[in-house]
Image (cartoon, grey):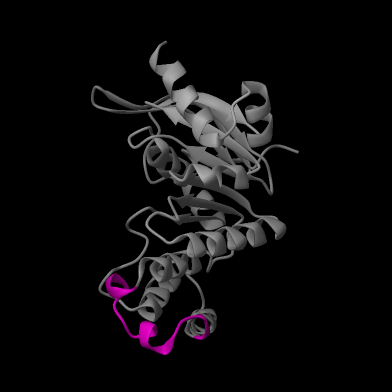
Amino acid sequence: MPAMIEVHDLGKRFGDFVAVDGIDFTVERGEIMGFLGPNGAGKTTTLKMIMGLLRITTGSILIDGLDGESQRAGIKRISGYMSQKFSLYPLLTPLENVELFGGISGLARAEIRRHREELRGRLPGTMVRLPTADLPPGVRQQVALFVCLMTDPRVILLDEPTSGVDPGTRRRFWQEIYTLKKRGKTILVTTHNLDEAEYADRILIIHRGHKVLEGRPADLLERSGLPTMEALFKQAIADHETH
């Protein structure tokens, strides 16, 4: 069976600047792929191309057999995207965000009401009435993930979902990711937290738009002889810098 996400020779240019330079990778069905790299490595740009939010300069993307250029509407119907900064409207309350994104996604009114009540049951009553901008970071990320999942997507793209949250919230977030994996979802998640890399089935490290390392965390550590993911990450980046 083909992989759920197939990326081949993917490139993105903004004028003379090359943000992504000919990367290849696949994400299997029901797999968690950890996408690592320093700031500016090209992670967010890659996710936006996969979701059809940015045009591809070179290469190709297939999502569950759908072409990333000609079938972008179909890809959006089966995918959920939680962006790093702009997943929610900050002046709206959590329930108002559910209403807005439910309507944009074409959900039925009854389904939107069900999601509203579900989220109301998950949050303390005072937070339900606050503008999203005033929520604690961990709660805001919880709401953003909830909104991302309202359409029950097969493919889930999470861009720095645990950025700025405390360790306890980070653990709970990854428990939710594992629950989604058990339900057969395919998940591509970017992170700066190297201790999270070992939670993924496989990791892919990019630097300056190039793929520099890919594989299962335990296998990569064993082959490298390095003790931690942080050491492995630093070595991969250093090796790329010298080439």
Q: Going 46% across and 55% down the picture, which residue do you hit?
A: 81
Q: Is residue 100 above or below residue 217?
A: below
Taking 90 as reference, is 130 above or below it? below
| The residue positioned farthest toward the top in the image shown | 243
The magenta-colored residue range is: 121-135
Mark count: 0
Residue 22 is at least partly visible in this image: no
Is residue 180 highlighted in magenta?
Answer: no
Q: Residue at x 51, y 30 (%)?
A: 231
Q: Nearer the viewer, residue 166 or 183?
A: 166
**Left or right: 33, with 11 as reference point:** right
Q: Nearer the viewer, residue 136 or 26?
A: 136
Image location (x, y in percent) of residue 37 = 43, 34
The answer to if 132 sits in the magenta stretch is yes
Q: Nearer the viewer, residue 117 or 162?
A: 162
Instruction: Answer whether residue 19 is visible to the viewer in this image.
Output: yes
Name which quarter of the figure residue 42 lies in: top left
For residue 217, which quarter of the picture? top right
Whole-percent x and y of residue 88? 35, 66
